[in-house]
Image (spheres, grey):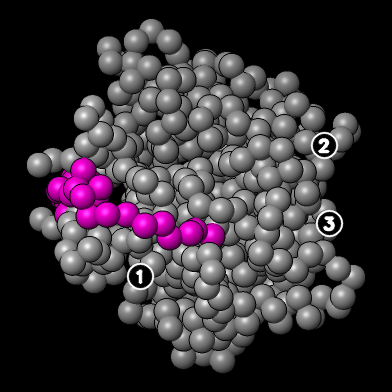
Amino acid sequence: MTVPTTRSSVHRTLVCLAVGGVLAGGRVLGSQEPPTPPQATAEPVAARIARVESGLLPPILLRGTEPERMSLAERMAHYGAKGLSVAVIDEFELAWARGYGVVRAGSKEPVTPETLFQAGSISKPVAALVALRLVAAGRLALDDPVNDHLAAWKLPDSAAAGSEPVRVRHLLTHSAGLAPFAFPAVPLQDPRPSLAELLGGRDTPGVTRIEPPGRRFRYSNPAFGVLQQLLTDVDGRPFARLAREEVFDPLGMASSSFEAVLPAAMLAQASHGHDGEGEPLPGKGLVVPAAVGGLWTTPTDLCRFLLAVFEASRTDGGFLPRTLAAGMVTRQLENRGLGTEIFAEGAARRTSHGGGLPGFVAFMVGYPELGRGAVVMVNSPGWDLMHEVLRAVAWEYAWPGYVVEHEVVPMAAGDFARFVGRYEFEVRPEVQPEITTASGRFFYGRWEMLPVSDRMFVIPDLGDEIEFVLGDGERATAFLYGQAGTRKIRARRVD
């Protein structure tokens, strides 16, 4: 199977799998020599909002060319997005929040900053904060074996995993060595098994251990299902109530809930999700285990979450002990914090997490040393749109390391020959793109690639980067693929 000939869902799936990694080449805008994005000023916030709304940016910027700036209204129409909400942090404060579009296709009810969206996997860092509150209270320790606390279900032993127990820390850093799978997302009205039943294998493959814990990062939905079960077993309160009393109420996150069925007042404020054809989902959204992806919230509430973590990580006497909060904004294993993704160092260090369920996508990013960040939520499949908005915010507020500019460099066809061949993605082996050359031009499938170093290329039409891995004899053995500023996914040579 060769690469699809349109910008298909396969490519979006691959890019979504990649989101959350390290930068790979290029010149970083907002670093020591930015191309003059606006700096912090005392000008009216309305002017800054207007520049964001008219300044959406593509993922690939080429040095020497004026970036193509796009309006939010035009891009929402282009993608068929029904509604979008954004909130921005600057100088350690909520700077502004706005809603755009409508809560349901065919309606006139506008999205406002108070409109609730499903956050998908952004639920995970919020669940991590719930866990750390119990750690701070002495109810739990990060290095406790999880089976010491689990009651309704136990993590099974496995010869492949060895004798080292899975600890709470491993769950939070996606390093528990659990076999990956996705929990079923079901309509609100459908009967649902208990979480313990799902963990044990009802309607899912069941949670199994496939390697020793603590060895490496492997993104894990099951780990946060286990975490949710552990927290309810330790504390006794249902998880939604536990989160409300330990996190949402103290932080003023009044528009946030892990309830599978929202209270009536919150349900009235919730947006409908929409499928790929723009049709509203029945019941507004789908249900998955809460800590895995079940959070309903707003960008404003998620900014409150970020600000609380930032403050606690910088000062004593905050919402969490400083050492625990610091674990959420510093690397613990590879690019993972406790429940979060971490990129770069120093002032450029940022924490982020994305989320998506059928009908919704969301992304949050924050700079704990600078007090900057933003959250964007969309009520339809709008991953590309969401990141165009985030790049506009990053440009306006001079986020270091977020927007990358590349310079095209010359490359002879003979030098390119070492890359030519067929490859397969390790996460999707059925996707096997071909790297070719013709008439002095270089291609990934049917899309032209532009060289930006001796082994790295950008694909302007897809907004993606490819960095080749060279083996003995300087022949490429693999490549890393993804959008700028994300964790890349690997494809290996197969011919």
Disc 2 or 3, which lies upstream in sequence? Answer: 3
Which stretch is magenta?
405-434
Circle 3 residue: 91
Q: Quadrant of residue 157?
A: top left
Q: Nearer the viewer, mark 3 or mark 1?
A: 1
Question: Which image quarter: residue 69?
Answer: bottom right
First of labels 1, 2 by sequence position: 2
Q: Nearer the viewer, residue 95 or 103?
A: 95
Q: Give the residue at x 79% y 55%.
A: 252
Residue 453 x, y percent position in the rendering:
41, 49
Query: Relative to the observer, which residue lies in front, 346 or 156?
Result: 346
Instruction: Give the label on residue 461, or none.
Output: 1
- From mark 2 to mark 3, how far is it between C-alphas? 14 Å
Residue at the spot of label 2:
314
Mark 1 Cα-neighbour bin, 10 Å: few <14, some 14–19, many ≥20: few
Q: In the structure shown, which secondary structural element does the residue marked by tag 3 occupy?
A: loop
Q: Residues within 10 Å of mark 3 (few under 14, many from 20)?
A: few
Find residue 326 and report its horizontal and vertical position in percent: 72, 32
In this view, 148 is above or below 479: above
Q: Residue at x 73, y 34 (%)?
A: 325
